[in-house]
Amino acid sequence: MSRSIENNTNLQRFEWAEDGILSVLDYQLQDGVMVITHTGVPEAVGGRGIAADLTKYALDTARENGWTVRPQCSYAAAYIKRHPEYADLAV
C-alpha cells in the first residue's frame, strides 16, 4: 500500500484524500473492540483500491493495538472473508 492513511481518532475514522476527494472508514472503539461501521469511497475515486487500503490499514492498526474487530460494514466483513490472515481478529 502506497497511501499514507491517517487515523483521525477525534472522529474515529481512517481517512485518505485522493484528487481532493475524501474517503473514510468509520469505526467505534469499545473496550478493545474496533467496530467498523462504514467504508465510504465516493464514486469519483472508486475502483482504485481505496476501500481495500483503508480496511487493511484499519485491520493492521487493530492487530498492532491488540484489539479485536467487529465488522458491521458489509465491505469490511467481505474483506476479512477474502483475506483469512485477518480472520483471527473478527468477533
Image (spheres, rainbow, N blue to C red):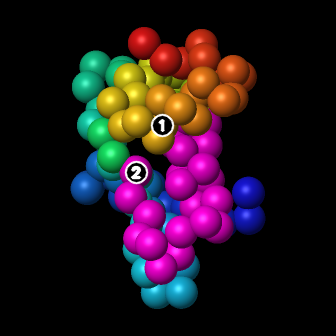
12 vs 69, left or right, is left
Q: Are marks 2 and 1 in contact (CB under 8 Å)?
A: yes
Inspect the image, locate mark 2, and give the three-letter code of the amino acid beneath it.
Thr
The image shows residue 28 at horizontal and vertical percentages of 27, 37
Q: Residues within 10 Å of mark 1 (few under 14, many from 20)?
A: many
Q: Residue at x 44, y 24 (%)?
A: 69
Who comes first in sequence, dot 2 or dot 1? Answer: 2
Q: Label 2: which residue?
A: 39
Q: Residue at x 54, y 44 (%)?
A: 55
Q: Secondary structure at mark 1?
A: helix
Q: Which residues are magenta?
A: 39-61
The image shows residue 37 at horizontal and vertical percentages of 30, 39
Q: CA distance from mark 2 to mark 1?
A: 8 Å
Give residue 64's mark. none
Give residue 76's mark. 1
Magenta-highlighted stretch: main secondary structure?
helix
Asked if 30 appears above or below 51 in the picture, the reply is above
Asked if 71 appears above or below 60 in the picture, the reply is above
The stretch drawn in magenta includes residue 56: yes
The image shows residue 32 at horizontal and vertical percentages of 36, 21
Q: Residue at x 25, y 56 (%)?
A: 11
The stretch drawn in magenta includes residue 27: no
The image shows residue 43 at horizontal and vertical percentages of 45, 72
Q: Residues within 10 Å of mark 2 (few under 14, many from 20)?
A: many
Q: Quadrant of the C terminus?
A: top left
Inspect the image, locate mark 1, and give the three-letter code of the amino acid beneath it.
Ala
Q: Residue at x 69, y 21 (%)?
A: 84
